[in-house]
């Protein structure tokens, strides 16, 4: 008598997965993000102070800034500048980390 192979049984057990975050740690992403945030914040503060405090003197021409006034609008622009700069710096540092890591492999 020939026995047929039995189909594998289905279980609810989840197979163990490798630990996550190894690549993130190897590329120093948290450090790069912190440096990017610091650089972005510093650049935004300097730009905001130069514009709002008029450190180079008053700017030519007057404009109307509805609802928030000039300080509010430039604060929003400073936030956008800080976010974009932080992302750019963190990305560049992570790419440098990836390049250095690829050289060691």
Image (cartoon, rainbow, N blue to C red):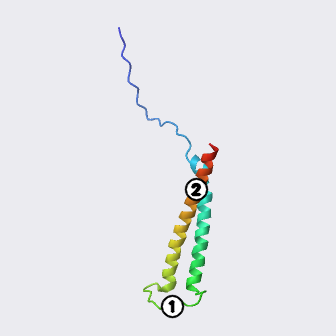
Identify the residue at the far right of this view: 104
Q: Position of residue 74 (x, y in %)?
A: 51, 80
Q: Which is more N-terminal, label 1 or label 2?
A: 1
Q: Residues within 10 Å of mark 1 (few under 14, many from 20)?
A: few
Mark 2: secondary structure: helix
Q: Does residue 27 appear anywhere in the picture?
A: no
Q: Does residue 10 appear anywhere in the picture?
A: yes
Q: Is the N terminus in the top left, top right, bottom left or bottom right quadrant?
A: top left
Residue at 54% across / 64% down in the picture? Answer: 88
Q: Which mark is residue 91?
A: none
Residue at 58% across / 69% down in the picture? Answer: 40
Disc 2 to disc 1, how far (Cα)?
Answer: 41 Å
Q: Position of residue 6 (x, y in %)?
A: 38, 21
Give the answer, above or below, for where 27 lies relative to 63: above
Q: Which residue is mark 2?
A: 94
Residue at 58% across / 46% down in the picture? Answer: 22
Where is residue 11, by image quadrant?
top left
Residue at 52% across / 68% down in the picture? Answer: 84
Q: Foreground residue, 3 or 26?
A: 26
Where is residue 53, by image quadrant?
bottom right
Instruction: Tell me: 7 left or right of 36.
Output: left
Q: Position of residue 15 (x, y in %)?
A: 49, 36
Q: Which residue is mark 1?
A: 60
Question: Which of labels 2 and 1 is toward the front?
Answer: 1
Q: Position of residue 49 (x, y in %)?
A: 59, 82
Q: Is the C terminus in the top left, top right, bottom left or bottom right quadrant?
A: top right
Where is residue 10, by image quadrant?
top left
Mark 1: secondary structure: loop
């Amino acid at each position: 008598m020939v026995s047929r192979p039995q189909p594998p049984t289905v279980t609810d057990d989840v197979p163990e997965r490798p630990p996550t975050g190894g690549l993130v740690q190897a590329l120093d992403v948290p450090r790069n993000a912190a440096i990017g945030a610091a650089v972005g914040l510093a650049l935004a503060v300097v730009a905001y102070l130069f514009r709002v405090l008029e450190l180079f003197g008053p700017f030519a021409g007057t404009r109307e800034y509805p609802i928030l006034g000039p300080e509010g609008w430039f604060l929003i622009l400073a936030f956008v500048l800080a976010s974009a700069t932080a992302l750019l710096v963190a990305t560049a540092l992570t790419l440098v980390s990836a390049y250095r890591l690829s050289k060691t492999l």
